[in-house]
Amino acid sequence: MSFAKKFERLLKDFIREVMAGTVPLHTHNLIATDTLGEVLEKFIVLHIRVWNLEDAAGLAETDEEFVKIQRKINHCFKVMRPRLLNAINAMLAEVIREDRMGYVTDYPIKQYGGFEE
């Protein structure tokens, strides 16, 4: 099964759970930003930082240096990543529950001659 098909199946399952009310919304105190785009950006930046830390861990010259870098990696995956994922899930669930999916549109903006609806 392709990645796109798996992703679509997971998204449909998530929407079904949200509509059934089985996904709790804990939007308070999760994030300091207001938009889904900002949270996704933080999530992407976090993963890029982890990749850089993993590269640095591979180049560590001492055990102490390696342990210090590994603690940073663990913090990213055990603290920061779950916090961001919870925020993303809560924001998506809120959009789905409030039926704001119409805001997501696919305009033909790649036609560089201009924008027409």
Image (cartoon, grey):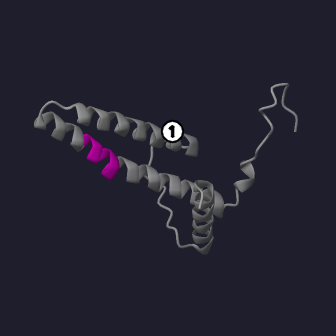
**Residue 114 at what x, y percent from top left?**
84, 27
Residue drawn 63% across the image and 56% down it: 95
Which one is in front, 93 or 64? Answer: 64
- 100 drawn magenta: no
- 77 drawn magenta: yes
Residue drawn 75% across the image and 53% down it: 102
Secondary structure beneath dot 1 equals helix
**Residue 12 at what x, y percent from top left?**
63, 65
Q: Quadrant of the N terminus?
A: bottom right
Residue at label 1? 41
**Residue 92 at what x, y percent from top left?**
58, 56
Q: Answer above or below: position of 71 versus 56.
A: below
Q: Give the side of residue 33 with respect to residue 104, left or right.
A: left
> Most prominent secondary structure in the magenta stretch?
helix
Residue drawn 59% across the image and 68% down it: 13
Q: Answer above or below: position of 34 versus 17.
A: above
Q: Amino acid at mark 1?
A: Glu
Q: Give the side of residue 73 with respect to residue 26, left or right.
A: left
Q: Residue furthest top?
A: 113
- Neighbour class for label 1 at 10 Å: few (<14), some, many (≥20)? few
Q: Give the side of residue 91 with respect to residue 66, left or right.
A: right
Q: Answer above or below: position of 78 versus 32.
A: below
Q: Quadrant of the C terminus?
A: top right
Residue drawn 33% across the image and 49% down it: 77
Q: Residue furthest right?
A: 116
What are the residue bounds of the magenta stretch? 72-79
**Residue 36 at what x, y percent from top left?**
56, 46
Q: Give the side of residue 51 with respect to residue 39, left or right.
A: left
